[in-house]
Amino acid sequence: MPTTSRPDLLLPADPGLRALARQLYALAAEQPIISPHGHVDPALLAEDRPFPDPSRLIIVPDHYLTRMLLSQGVPPAKLGVPTVDGSPVETDGRKIWRRFVDGWHLFRGTPSRLWLEQTLTEVFGVDTPLSPATADAVYDQVAARLAEPEFRPRALFDRFNIEVLATTESPLDDLAQHAKLAADGWGGPGGKVVTTFRPDNVVDMEFDNWAGNVERLGAVAGEDTGTYAGFLAALRRRREAFIAAGATCSDHGHPTAQTLDLDAREAAALYERGLRGTADAADAEAFRAHMLLEFARMSLDDGLVMQLHPGSVRNHNRWLYARHGRDVGGDIPQATEYLHALTPLLDAHGNDPRLRVVVYTLDEYTFTRELAPLAGGYAALYLGAPWWFLDSPEVLRRFREAVTETAGFYNTAGFVDDTRAFCSIPVRHDVARRVDAGFLARLVAEHRLTEDEAAETIVDLAYRLPKRVYKIGEQL
């Protein structure tokens, strides 16, 4: 869905470069969206109900927005974010909206402002600039749109020109929403909406109620997870179920990128200490690291693409976690080492083209020093796009500048939006396409690429590369 209100948004200021970038962007803008990693609730599309109100659509689920106001003393509960400790929560959508818009100036210069402004104008057709004085008028315009059939989730999905959207589920999920999507012709292998296998809550011994989760895994999979062998068998069974529901990828959100290749006896001893409650932090890290090797071996058998999202200190804001739970904006990036951490995995399988491992980072200083050389030297390794705290025009530009000379374009995996905010998907992809158009236009102007090569490359980056790397549309 191309931007129409500001056609030269993010394109180079130099007139000659801008003209080239416009031509390249036009090619990218018409490509369908491949969204291979994100956190949209599949129930949104399975049930296809009208959105309740502008605040619950735009503000409540978007921790990019709520965490900024928290930094200025506005508790998330005042913005409608559900609590887990029984604290009261604001439920009046208009009050939530007004309170958020009172802090709109806090977002000047941020990607959150860019995304939301584009969402309001391009998705909802709202041209009124957002301010405390216009808060009610904008709220009413968006609410009126949400009452129209054209703004139901499935209608917007088609209007956004999304070809495939991947959601993210735990192995404990019964995948009922994906079953409903498949029954409606929207899900399953080759469907519009597919799932992703995210096993963190049964792999990370430091996860809340890890032993209980492992027990539930056994019940869901029909395996005895009282033993390490049974645990691996249960994971394989759940992967089979996810593949049947359309999954082409697994995803692993570990604190570090550490990998470790233990023998079965050592791994079983770690696992048993975890079940007994005697494992320490070093045991937990070793078990996570070893399981990445186990999952690589499983991927060689079943074809799932591995995604590794390391580097986040989860729930750093302990007050926020205690009051609201996980995934509400309390996580913070940390420095992450890849070269030595990934060596056991790469020694074992890095040169096997059957394996695909897409590695992300929250530490952009690793782009040039470690990640680009690694992706440029191993058949199994690809670079994921800047995500989360790095998903911004400036870092997207720096990413291309940092990695292209070493890894090229074709050892990268295309853009991911990584969002829970459904209506932001098209504008986030649009931003990435515009940044790529500007970068490629510069290469053409410097006589480093021909216009034909740049035209082919931008379509690859926007569409063909993510579809190939993440095996979108393939039968595993």
Image: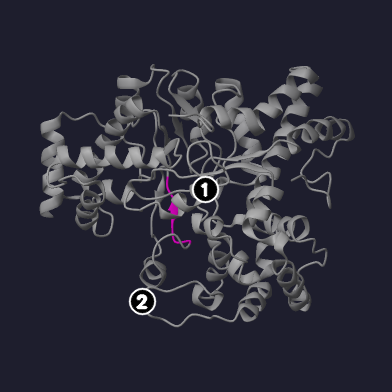
Secondary structure of residue under mark 1: loop
Q: Residue at x 80, y 35 (%)?
A: 26
Residue 192 is marked as none
* Disc 1 versus disc 2: nearer the observer: 1
Q: Position of residue 276 (x, y in %)?
A: 10, 53
Q: Nearer the viewer, residue 447 or 243?
A: 243
* Number of numbered callouts drawn: 2
What's under tag 2, amino acid-wise? Answer: Asp
Task: Give the mark nearer the N terminus: 1 vs 2.
Answer: 1
Is 332 magenta? The answer is yes
Residue 38 is marked as 1
Q: Residue at x 42, y 47 (%)?
A: 334
Q: Residues within 10 Å of mark 2 (few under 14, many from 20)?
A: few
Q: Position of residue 137 (x, y in %)?
A: 78, 76
Q: Position of residue 48 (x, y in %)?
A: 58, 60
Is 429 magenta? The answer is no
> With respect to residue 465, does 40 lie above or below?
below
Asked which quadrant contains residue 232, the reply is top left
Q: What secondary structure is the magenta-colored segment mainly? A: loop
22 relative to 157 in the view: left or right: right
**Can you say which quadrant of the picture contains the C terminus?**
top left
Secondary structure of residue under mark 2: loop
What's under tag 1, amino acid-wise? Answer: Gly
Q: Residues within 10 Å of mark 1 (few under 14, many from 20)?
A: many
Q: Residue at x 12, y 43 (%)?
A: 227
Q: Which residue is mark 2?
A: 85
> With respect to residue 406, does 360 lie above or below?
below
Q: Position of residue 11 (x, y in %)?
A: 79, 40
Magenta residues span 329-334
Q: Can the viewer see residue 181?
A: yes
Q: Residue at x 88, y 30 (%)?
A: 16
**Residue placed furthest toward the right:** 15
